[in-house]
Amino acid sequence: MYSTLNQSKTRLKKSKKIIVILLLIAYTSVKTMARFASSDDPGNKSLQIAALLTITASRSPMVRIVIVGGGRAGIAAAQALAKDLTPNDGTEVIVFEKSKYYYHAVGTPRAVVDAEYTKKLFVPYDKAIPVEARSFVKIQRAIVTRIVPGNEVEYTPIGNDDEMVAGPVQRLSPGSTCTVPLKQPKNNFKRSTTEFMMAELRQQIENANSILIVGGGATGAGVAGEIKAKFPTKNVAIIEGKDKLLGSDNVREKFRSRLLQFLKRLDMDVVLGERLTERLNGNSFERRTLRTDKGRELISDIQLLCGGFSPTTELIKSLDESLVTPQGLIKVNSKLQLDDSRYANIYALGDANNNSAPKHMLFASQQGTRLGSELALVARKTQTNVSKDFPKVEVAPAMIPLGPNGGVSQLPIFGGVVYGNFVTRTFKSKEYFASFAWKNLNAEVPK
């Protein structure tokens, strides 16, 4: 397939049927916005949590599936297709990903205080696809810039120097954006850039006496806990606009009260139900006095933005703005298809969709695996369409380490059972699932 993509403005031959998974997976015709770097480039990928999948069945027996984004959903879909298909099934799968590495964002709270952990955030994609499937499942470094009505996907290739080969700087794949360190910088996906910004953040935390965490979700609580565990004499405060911690998460009130209890036990100030009158767009490294909508003054040396989740859905908006909710999420049905019969071959997974499943790595992975397995059946003509609804999540697991020695957990049994330090330390506090992330991509965790 790549031999047909080595010239500017070339495109894949159109096929009769396409399936797209947004994280992103797209099919049919693919048009480059610039000259391809190399037809033999093994490529790398790393778009965060959302996927777009398109399957194209051409006049020939060949079926093509394009996945845009190498986050958990995208990689899970690609690995499921690699597992269930064979070279004899006449199917090509392409994963378009902008980075050389999967970014293990789950571990960033530890990395903000532990320089040695940073190297565990960058998992190479080199072995993500089994050797026996690499002839038909390929990872290509590129940024998708547009889905063209008529089943075309435009993209800009990325060379081995981490630079776009040519063309305008456009990216905008489904997924989400947050402030570093939660996600890699939106406009610069070099590992060195993220490492530099992480090192700067660590230094600022070390130098500060007082730190304000803006956002009382899982990340905000986790970052605050890691800082207090590492630097117990620093003054750390959390402000959350909702009247409870993890207000958007499917956890029991017992979990929230236990978490609040543990944070206060660490001598943290937790301000709930108040919002800053000044909206922060990123981290700030200067001493400031900020006020809340209820008149409270918060004085801190640095301010860390650990909230403000923003789905990146411009690719779908360019198709039809009505496919995106007022909250900025892509509308999907119970099968994760775009909620419009005109685009039944496009699926949106992970952070970007409005499915009720929690926006967690676990459920993004489950969505990708489930859809990839069904698409393999479609590609092999065992069934004509994806038929299974993604199951509703009644009780979600949750684990928030507050340093390496403990935290609060909720296991999805008996309506949600809440545990403290022992369970959290046993399963997550030690390394934030780094071993799992590396093993999942068939890579070895750095020592």
Image (cartoon, rainbow, N blue to C red):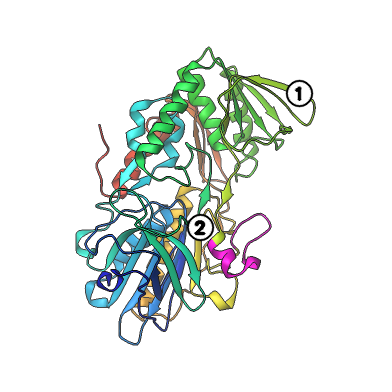
Q: Say if 263 sits above or below 170 in the image.
A: above
Q: Quadrant of the N terminus?
A: bottom left
- When the figure is inspected, residue 250 is found, relative to residue 73, above or below; the finding is above
In this view, the residue in front, 243 or 407, is 243
Q: Which residues are magenta?
A: 315-330
- The picture quadrant where one finds residue 31 is bottom left
The reply to whether residue 372 is visible in this rendering is yes
Residue 41 picture quarter: bottom left
Q: Is residue 301 magenta?
A: no
* Residue extending farthest top: 233
The reply to whether residue 111 is in sight is: no
Residue at 72% of width from left, 35% of height from top? 243
Q: Rounded to the nearest whole Å, what is the CA distance between mark 1 and mark 2?
A: 37 Å
Q: Secondary structure at mark 2?
A: loop
Read off the residue under disc 2: 174
* Near-viewer residue (75 or 203): 203
| Residue at 48% across, 53% down | 363
Residue drawn at 44 percent across, 42 percent down = 184
- Give the mark, 1 or 2, whose residue is nearer the N terminus: 2
Structural crowding at the residue carrying mark 1, measured as other residues with C-alpha within 10 Å and reported as few (<14), some (14–19) or many (≥20): few
Amino acid on which the number 2 mark rests in the picture: Pro
Residue 85 location, x and y as percent?
Answer: 28, 70
Residue 178 screen position, x and y as percent:
53, 43
- Callout 2 environment at 10 Å: few (<14), some (14 to 19), or many (20+)? many
Whether the magenta-drawn stretch holds residue 323 is answered as yes
Q: Which of the numbered marks, if any, corresponds to residue 275?
A: none
Image position of 104 (left or right of 260): left
Residue furthest out toward the bottom: 59
Kindly identify which residue carries mark 1: 296
Residue 392, percent across and down? Answer: 56, 59
Q: Circle 1 sits in a helix, a strand or a loop, which is it?
A: loop
> Marks 1 and 2: CB-CB under 8 Å?
no
